[in-house]
Amino acid sequence: MKEGSGDDQNVAPSVYSHVSRPGSHRYKNAKKGLPFNIMLVGESGLGRTTFLNTLCERMVVTPNDGPNPEQAHIAEPMQFKHHTVEMEEDGMKIILNIIDTPGFGNGIDNESCFNQIQDYLEAQFDEVLAEENRIKRNTKFRDSRVHALIYFITPTGHSLREIDIELMKRLGNRTNVIPVIARSDSLTPRELVLFKQRIMNDIAAFDIPVFNFPDPEEEDDDENSEENAELRAMLPFAVVGCEEVVNEDGRPVRVRNYPWGVVQVDNDEHSDFDRLRYVLLNSHIGDLRDRTQNELYELYRTEKLSGNAMASADQQQQQQQPEQHQAALAAQPRSVVA
Ligand SMILES: Nc1nc2c(ncn2[C@@H]2O[C@H](COP(=O)(O)OP(=O)(O)O)[C@@H](O)[C@H]2O)c(=O)[nH]1
Ligand SMILES: [Mg+2]
């Protein structure tokens, strides 16, 4: 993002990145800005708001003081909160729509949260489907399909919990689910390695369809194959969020300061945040959008149309039945009523 764009008061200076990047696949000709829609899902306190502000490099949302203690026993229903931020990333303008889901997982039964999110994702597909069927196109149509869902895993150090498995399994066929370990600075490097392994074992064992960077074997391009192999090995991304920027050797650096040390958010030895940001807003923005259109939407469209076709065949049959019944009755030899 360029300094000075957007609301100057809230713009944090661009931070120093430690990672040297391989070539990016970008959409150069998006003059009006490339729309990109991200949903953030995770339990309260895992750092969704902080992640959002860190990703956008500005205070899009001011963190609140938390719930009123008198109301703490009442689980607030989940909401969808929309934030739109214009970004400029490596010369490319992006219209970033972020959908936050405060209230997720706060209740004892999470079924309604799962349903609400699934309904939301499908409703965006339905809008595109309706638009495609219109005779006259609406030139102002905004594609609001969710291109990536960042799922925040609680840093327990154990393995995935039922809520994680259930949610990712349910939504993995409707959007690109990218699992991240929230507040990953609470685990030591060794704990983090083991936690990542356990999560990936669970993902394989429960057959959870997360966004997996395409198999290098299937890619023709060597550079991308290498990059994707590296990213697959990093899953799930260990993220650290922070809004504080300090000056280090004349360079602005985003840090979490503790009495015992400092965590640099953009330092790849401290967290995968910088890499994830680059994946989302640069190297894989095209892949995430393409998969949404060509695989996830197509799958939904086929399911919906074949479901509709079956439903209307059923309806037709039901409608025909009375006629058939009448015809069958008429064809029957009249009984002689005694
Ligand atoms: N240790 C640590 N704390 C974090 C991190 N991200 C956010 N926090 C803190 O966690 C608390 C809740 O963060 P917030 O972004 O409001 O969480 P949300 O409820 O998911 O939106 C705040 O005190 C944040 O400063 C992180 O990466 N590491
Ligand atoms: Mg929040």
Image: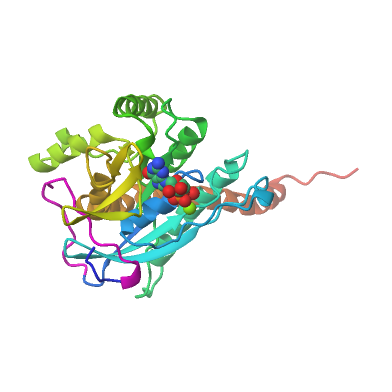
**Residue 125 appears in the figure:** no
Q: Relative to the observer, which residue lies in front, 265 or 274?
A: 265
Q: Quadrant of the N terminus?
A: bottom left
Magenta region's main secondary structure?
loop
Q: Reply yes or no: does residue 51 show up in magenta.
A: no
Q: Is residue 29 magenta?
A: yes
40 sits left or right of 26 in the view: right
In the drawing, does residue 275 fall left or right of residue 22? right
Q: Is residue 244 visible?
A: yes
Residue found farthest to the left = 222
Q: How many marks?
A: 0
Q: Position of residue 73 (x, y in %)?
A: 67, 45
- Give the residue displayed 32% in from the left and 59% down from the top: 56
Which residues, given as a range, are shown in magenta? 8-30
Q: Nearer the viewer, residue 25 or 105?
A: 105
Place of residue 332 in the rendered image (x, y in percent of width and height, measured from the top left): 71, 45
Foreground residue among 245 and 153: 245
- The structure's colour scheme is rainbow
Q: Position of residue 330 (x, y in %)?
A: 71, 51
Outermost residue toward the front in this view: 259
**Residue 202 or residue 131, whichever sits in front:** 202
